[in-house]
Image (tube, rainbow, N blue to C red):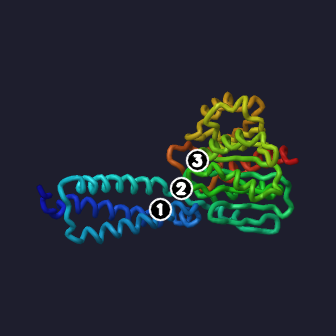
Amino acid sequence: MTDAPAAPAPAWLRWAERAVAALALAVVAWALATESGGIVHAHPAYPILLGVTVLAAAAVLILSLRARSSRAGWRRVLRVGGTVVALGWVAGLAWLRPATAEEPALAAMRSDGAVTVVESATRIVMAPHDGSGTAVLFQPGALVDARAYAAVLRPLAEAGHTVIITKQPLGIAFLDVGALDAARQERPELTRWVVGGHSLGGVVASMEADADDSADTQPVVGLLLFASYPAGDLSTSLTAAVESISGSEDGLSTPAAIEASRDDLPADAHFTVVDGAVHAFFGDYGTQAGDGTPTISHDEARARIGAAAVAFVDSLAG
């Protein structure tokens, strides 16, 4: 018994494929039009995904103009399944669009007589001209341009501490858990490390601190949390000093959540609450959905956050 001859794919399937391909191109164009700075300065993973998406969508549109045959069996099922998967891919691509850094963070990216700023594909390094042996590795919040933290962290570099801001693959800190190990290997002259992070970045920073606070060389001596808290109980395992800086009006890492994190951190952890500050004030990337309403200016909040961070790292510098 021979298979039935292939027939042209049904019109609804061809149009569905075309619609998803067109939507993919539209999402890429929208991302580039609205957050081009964050994309250009992102870890290469997201721009690569955008490029692959454009090529795949163009190929689908070209092939759809041909009268391709499609048997009614498993081949057609694969095409339908592929269309559904592609739709999910496009949705994920839209969700992963990063929030672009704004002023004064962009101005803080410039080198001067006190600090040299070097940006690469995977990190930003702010190096003081006359530095201590203590460095800060900072993990950004989810889907935030790493440059957005330059202004709030630059005072640390001006105080003599090397600051390394990671560029996470796809803007997700959990995809960059090896950043500390890589930085320590590349910078052996930096003998003491403080790891920090904003929001989700702080969760990963707490994991890195717990894993490396007892290292024989280049130990983690401090954990710096910006509107964040650990995912698990570190109250007895973490030996590094802890500074938790939060905002009283934060609608995401709420004051209640920060207060509850006391039980998961060592008893001597220090908590600084910046009255009037919200979640997005820990960087410079615009407003954030679900956040609270600030009662102080962003400039004032940034200054208080930066001062508390400097005081903490200064206290640990050997």
Tell me where residue 11 appears, x and y as whole percent.
18, 61
Amino acid type assigned to the residue bearing label 3 in the image? Phe
Amino acid type assigned to the residue bearing label 1 in the image? Leu
Given contact means CB atoms under 8 Å apart, are the residues at marks 2 and 3 in contact? Answer: no
Amino acid type assigned to the residue bearing label 2 in the image? Leu
Residue 17 seen from this side: yes
Identify the image quadrant of the N terminus.
Answer: bottom left
Looking at this view, name the residue that lies furthest to the right. 318
What residue sits right under mark 2 in the picture?
A: 170
Given contact means CB atoms under 8 Å apart, are the residues at marks 2 and 1 in contact? Answer: yes
Mark 2, secondary structure of its residue: helix
- Label 1 Cα neighbours within 10 Å, binned few <14 / some 14-19 / many ≥20: some
Q: CA distance from mark 1 to mark 3?
A: 18 Å
Q: Residue at the spot x=84%, y=44% of the render?
A: 315
The answer to whether 277 is drawn above or below residue 110 in the figure is: above
Judge from the rendering whether residue 84 lies leftward or rightward of residue 242; answer left or right: left
Judge from the rendering whether residue 177 lies leftward or rightward of residue 271; answer left or right: left
Looking at this view, name the residue that lies furthest to the front. 1
What residue sits right under mark 3 in the picture?
A: 174
Given contact means CB atoms under 8 Å apart, are the residues at marks 1 and 3 in contact? Answer: no
Judge from the rendering whether residue 22 lies leftward or rightward of residue 182; answer left or right: left
Tell me where residue 180 appears, x and y as whole percent.
70, 51
Rendered image: mark on residue 104: none
Q: Residue at the spot x=59%, y=49% of the render?
A: 173
Q: Residue at the spot x=81%, y=61% of the render?
A: 128
The answer to whether 195 is drawn above or below residue 2 in the figure is: above
Residue 33 seen from this side: no
* Residue 111 location, quadrant: bottom right
What residue sits right under mark 1 in the picture?
A: 49
Mark 3, secondary structure of its residue: helix
Q: Nearer the viewer, residue 152 or 168?
A: 168
The answer to whether 257 is drawn above or below residue 73 in the figure is: above
